[in-house]
Amino acid sequence: MTTDTQRPRPGSDILRTALRRNVGAMAGGTLLMGLYQAGETAFPIALGLIVEHTMRDNRTLGSLALSIGALAVIITTVSLSWRFGMRVLQKANTTEAHRWRVKVAGCGLQPVARDVDLKSGEVLTIATEDADQTADIVEVVPMLISSLVAVVVAAVALGLADLRLGALVMVGTVAILSILSVMSKRIGSSTREQQARVARAGAKVADLITGLRPLHGFGGNHAAFGSYRKVSTEARRQSITVAKVNGVYAGTALALNAVLAAAVTLTAGWLAFNGQITIGELVMAVGLAQFIMEPLKLFSEMPKYVMVARASAERMALVLSAPPVTTPGTERPAAGGDLDIDNVHYGTLRKLNFKVPAGEFVAITAYQPRAAADLASILAAKVPPHTYDGVVRVSGQEIGDLSMEAVREHLLVNPYDGEIFAGSLRTNIDPSGTSEMVPEAVEASMLTDVVALHREGLDYGVRDRGANLSGGQRQRLSLARALAADTDVLVLHDPTTAVDAVTEQLIARNVAKLRRGRTTIVITSSPPLLDAADRVLVLDDGVITAEDTHRNLLASDEAYCAAVAR
């Protein structure tokens, strides 16, 4: 197994990907929104022509009716093109945001972790807010082009009336965009910092919710609240800074657009006063001067949205471009299978050696809790094989040569703090809905009383993180899930620390009975589980120091007796 050295994917690549796979929708949306802007521009032009026509001596009712019909066509075009154009663009925007959300979530759910220094709360923010803001580029580009169409049409129309009016619009537009493009860079940098701080605050919330019960237990909730208040205050201050920058940007854009509109209006009035343009052209110029404020406003806001989308894309690139911690193999272990730990040195483990033949029930009691956690991490393949010395073999094959999917199917490590999901008892026990061992798992884990307690039985609703279950009920539910998976090799880490002694005794017997003939390892100091095992391995100071049955060890090893006897 080797480390992956793929080239990082920058945010610009993400934006290009979003644009490339929405070319069709963007082309259709651009056409419709261009028609909308052209129709809006045509309206004051048509009014100017009508006024010009009414000033002539040869005006007729037929020509007036034709003019009114033309206005009706323009209004209908404006209404329908806006409605269907926005429908096309918003559908593409929403679909693209969904694609990126799924992609970011998929990275977080892959069997092999990615080498990225982000907490789960930060990844959640990236998968939601940043995905939405990145997908906005699909809508921003067509709006930018359609706004440009409106400005160009207005400039051409004014230029036909008087070249100076058209030139004024074009020069003014370039000047406005030049000023705002400089300001948009400040928005981009401020937005990136804001998103990072909001993500850190989200990660802190996720950590606090996860540890809320133990925090209440030792009175650490006030200190935790103070820690959250600090990161939340930083996020709030940065949000205020971004709001101020956005406010200055919007105010500047509005002021510049108003100045340009006023300049066009005053110039047209001066030209009309000097007889250089007609009254109809004056009406058209004044109407266009008022109208172009809207496309100019949209046009001037586009750099800001582009910078925000780019900042969000860069944050998504942190997740999507992060290489996997390791590149797993492609082999699959043989069925049944034994487990061999050969000279493993990692953390507190020092040249650890032991072997569990296929079908044996082995208990491991660790005198140092850290050693138990390190062993569980290695067996769960959370630690890349290249980061520790020694070899872990599953069914005679090195774990580094096996595909991670095959390892997960063959070897299941159930942690002591197994997560409980919102749903029902049944979906927590059998998330895939394919297990045939649910009744046996419920009985073996002594979850039967929880099922019988509620009218809905296994369909009883469970809240997020098992908030409506006791600690012992959550632990038994997690154990039932592990047993229902019915894997060839099952590793349980402290599965009964939150249950009473009587229930613990029954669970130990049930697990030994249900798993007979299947390889089972229990990392525990529970006397009932130790007694139910075929043999017990004593893990002390990182090595196996003793090996025998539980009862023989109690009789011959004083240190063991002191460690596990209750």
Image (cartoon, rainbow, N blue to C red):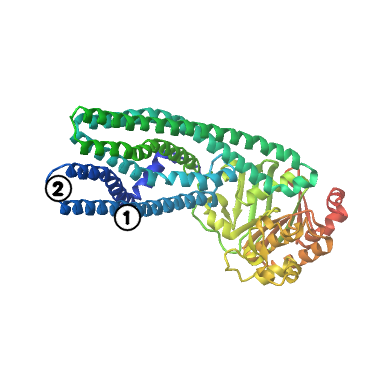
Q: Position of residue 46 (x, y in %)?
A: 23, 45
Q: Residues within 10 Å of mark 2 (few under 14, many from 20)?
A: few
| Secondary element type, mark 2 | loop
Horizontal relation, residue 399 to residue 368: left or right: left
Q: Is residue 498 left or right of residue 19?
A: right
Residue toward you, 547 or 262: 262
What x and y, as percent, mark residue 78?
30, 51
Between residue 187 and residue 123, name the one nearer to us.
187
Residue at the disc numbered 2:
59
Residue closest to the eye, 525 or 132: 132
Which numbered disc, 2 or 1, marks the residue closer to the eye?
A: 2
Q: Which residue is mark 1?
A: 80
* Measured Cα–Cα span from mark 2 to mark 1: 32 Å
Q: Which mark is residue 397?
A: none
Q: Is residue 455 above or below residue 342?
A: below
Quarter the C terminus occupies: bottom right
Confirm whether residue 486 shows in the render: no
x and y percentages locating residue 31 in the rendered image: 28, 49
Could you tell me residue 8's position as x and y percent?
Answer: 44, 39
Callout 1, which amino acid?
Leu
Q: Nearer the viewer, residue 353 or 45?
A: 45
